Image (tube, rainbow, N blue to C red):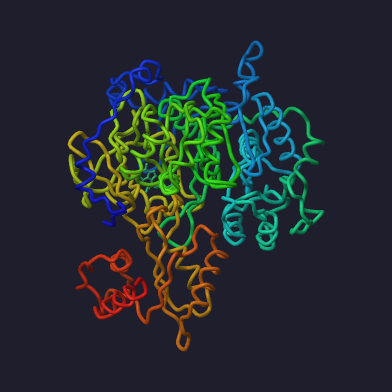
Amino acid sequence: MTGNNRGTSLEVLLQEDRRFPPPDAFRRSAWAKDENIYERAARDPKGFWENWAKELDWFQPWKKVLDWKPPHAKWFIDGKINACVNCVDRHVFSNTGHRARRNKAAIIWEGEPGDTRTLTYWDLYREVNRFANVLKKLGVKKDDRVAIYLPMVPELMIACLSCARIGAIHSVVFGGFSAEALRDRINDAQAKLLITADFGWRRGQQIQLKKAADEALENTPSIENAVVVKRGGFQDTAPQFQWKAERDHWWHELMEQAGAYAEPEQNDAEDMLFILYTSGTTGKPKGIVHTTGGYLTGVYATTKWVFDLKDEDVYWCTADIGWITGHSYVIYGPLANGAAVFIYEGAPDWPAKDRLWRLIEKYGITIFYTAPTAIRAFMKWGREWIEKSNLSSLRLLGSVGEPINPEAWMWYQENIGKGKCPVVDTWWQTETGSIMITPLPGITVTKPGSATRAFPGIEAEVLDEKGGRIEAGGGCVAITKPWPSMLRTIYKDDERYVKTYWSKWNKSIYFPGDGVKRDEEGYFWFTGRVDDVIKLSGHRIGAAEVESALVDYPAVAEAAVVGKTHEIKGQAIVAFVTLKEGKKGSPELVNELKAHVVKKIGAIARPEEILFSADLPKTRSGKIMRRLLRDIAEGKALGDTTTLADPAVVEHLKAQYEEVEG
Ligand code: WTA
C-alpha cells in the first residue's frame, strides 16, 4: 500500500487527541442534530433515501426504491424527474403562484478582474429557459452529448442546467485541460455541440479557450456547432481564435433570438444527467456516468446536512465546475437546496494573496468549502494576508480532495474559522457523486485530520486485501451497500466499470482505491490512494496518462511516473524516462518533455521532476516497479527488491536521483 501522509506518520495521526465538539449554538439550530439518525438510517437505508427523494419535485413518483443486481443499481424505478426544475423552477413557482426565493440570489459571481454579476432565481429561470431553446434550435435532443469548456462564469452553470432541462447529457471539460485532452473527451462521448468562451481570466492572463477549442475541433467529426460565450469586457485585445461562420455562434446573439420558455423534459430517474471524465490507472480517462434521480437525491441530502445549508447562507465552494466537486457542490446540491451560491473566476493570489478573504468579507460568505492544498498555500503565505479582512460572517468550513494533515486542519480552524466554525473534512470521489464519509457539523465531535464517519445511509468499512473486516487499524476503504448517487457505469465501457470498482473483493462491494485507518472509536483517517492515481493540488491525474504523454515524444523509449510528497500540492509528479538509442538527456530535453505533457494533457499535469535513466526497475516478467521508484523519489530506504530482474538498476537510479536532488 502506498501512503500519502505527508510526513505525518499514521501512528502520530492516531495519537491525535484533540477533540472539537459542535458549538452549542450551532448544534441547536442545525438541520441534523439528533445522533439517532445514524442508527435509523442503518436500519432502513432504502427508507432513509426514499425520504430524501420525497423532498425533491417529481413529475411521477417511483414504483420501487432500488433495483440492485450487483454491481448494477437503479434507484427510484419509473420515477420521472428533471434536475433543472429541481434546481430552478421550484424555487420560483409553486402550484398556485410565486415563491419567495424567486427574488433571492441564486448565483453571485465575481470575475478575476473584479467585474460582478448576480442572478436571482428568476434570472436563472429566464436564462436556462432561453438557453434550452438555443440548444434545441441547434438540433440538440434528449440524450445527445454536449461538451462544455468554459471558465468559471455563470454561463457554465446555465449551460449545465439547460442541458438537464431538455434531457441532454453534459460533459464538462476543465478549462485547464489542453486541446488534445478536450478532443479526446469530445470524441469518446461523441458530443454534438461544444460550448466554450473566447477566453477566461487567470492571474491576469487571458486563457485562450476558443483557440484551444479550434485546435480540438479540427478532429472531432461528431461536433456540429460551437457556442461561444463572449467573456471579453476587460482589456479587449485582438481575438486569437478563428471563426467558422457555419459552425460558430456567439452565445449572446443566439440568446437574443431565443424563446422565453422551454418545457422541461420528463426524464426517467435513471436517464443520464452527465458524463465526467476522470483519471484511473490506465492511459485513458474514464467517462463516469451519473444519472438523474439518485444523483440529485444524494447531492441534495448531503449539501443540506453536511453544510447545514440555510436560506440565509451565502455558500462558496471554491472548486472549478470542471471537477466533480463543482458539479455536485457548486451546481446541483446547493441549487436544489435553493442556496445563494457564490462563484469566483480566478486565482486566489490575484491581484494579491488576500483575494479570497476580501471576497468573503465583501459578499458575507457564511460557508466556505476548499481543498487542503489551498489551505497549505494560505499557511505558507502567512497570516498577514488574512488579518486585513473581516471573516466574521463565516460559520462553517469544509475540506475536500485529499487527506488533510492535522496541522492544516488546525490552522484552518483557528485562522479562518477563528475557533468558532465547525470544520467538515469530506471524503468522496467523482464516482460516488456525493459526500460519503464526513462529520455532520451539528452532531460529530471532530478530530483534526479525520473525515470521521460515514454519512447516514452509507455503509463504509475497512477491509484487508482478502476482504477481511478490520475493526481498528489500516486497510482499504470499502462501500458495502449501494447508494443513490453512485456511478452507474463507465461510458461505453461497462466491463471496465465492473473490473475497476467491483472486482477487488466481490461484486457487491465497491472498491474506491483509497487507503484508510480506523481508530478505536471507528473514525476514518484517509492516507491516500493505493493505486497509481496521483492527487496533485487535489486534482486527479493518472500516472499512466502522464507516461503515455511522455512516450508519445519521439526521443522517449519508456517512462514511469510516480507521485512524490509535496509540501503544498500534496503530491507532485516525478517521471523516470529512458531515451531511445543515441538520444541524450539534457536540461533542454527536460523542458521539451514538460511542455509536451502540457500539450497532451494540460498544465496541471506538468512533471515537477524528470530524471533520465538508462534502465527502469522491472520484474522478471517486464513490469515496471513503480513502488520502488516511489521509494527513490521519496528518498526512502528501498523496499523489497528480490523480484527485480536486475537489482543493480534500482541501486544505480537511487544514487543518480540523490545526486540530482543534491
Ligand atoms: C481523495 C474529489 C482524503 C481520495 C471529490 C479519493 C480525499 C479522490 C478526500 C477522489 C478527503 C477526496 N480525505 N482523501 N476528504 N476527498 N479524496 O474523483 O483519494 O477528484 O479517492 O473527487 O480524492 O478524487 P476526485
Q: Residue pushed farthest top?
A: 96
Q: Nearer the viewer, residue 596 or 349?
A: 349
Residue 160 drawn at (x, y percent): 61, 39
Q: Which of 350 and 606 is in front in this view?
A: 350
Whether 147 is drawn above or below 558: the answer is: above
Give the quadrant of residue 628.
Answer: bottom left
Residue 59 drawn at (x, y percent): 57, 23
Q: Is residue 256 left or right of residue 556?
A: right
Query: Which residue is found at the position 47% from the left and 38% from the top?
Result: 386
Give the quadrant of residue 16.
Answer: top left
Whether 602 is drawn above or below 548: the answer is: above
Query: Which residue is found at the position 52% from the left and 77% from the top?
Result: 588
Quarter of the figure with the N terminus: bottom left
Q: Is residue 264 left or right of residue 61?
A: right
Residue 105 drawn at (x, y percent): 62, 25
Q: Nearer the viewer, residue 422 or 76?
A: 422
Residue 498 drawn at (x, y percent): 38, 50
Q: Residue pushed farthest bottom?
A: 582
Whether 220 is drawn above or below 192: the answer is: below
Q: Is residue 593 left or right of residue 124?
A: left
Quarter of the figure with the C terminus: bottom left
Total numbered labels placed on residues in the image: 0
Query: Which residue is found at the position 33% from the left and 71% from the top?
Result: 624
Query: Which residue is found at the position 39% from the left and 72% from the top?
Result: 576
Whether 416 is drawn above or below 608: the answer is: above
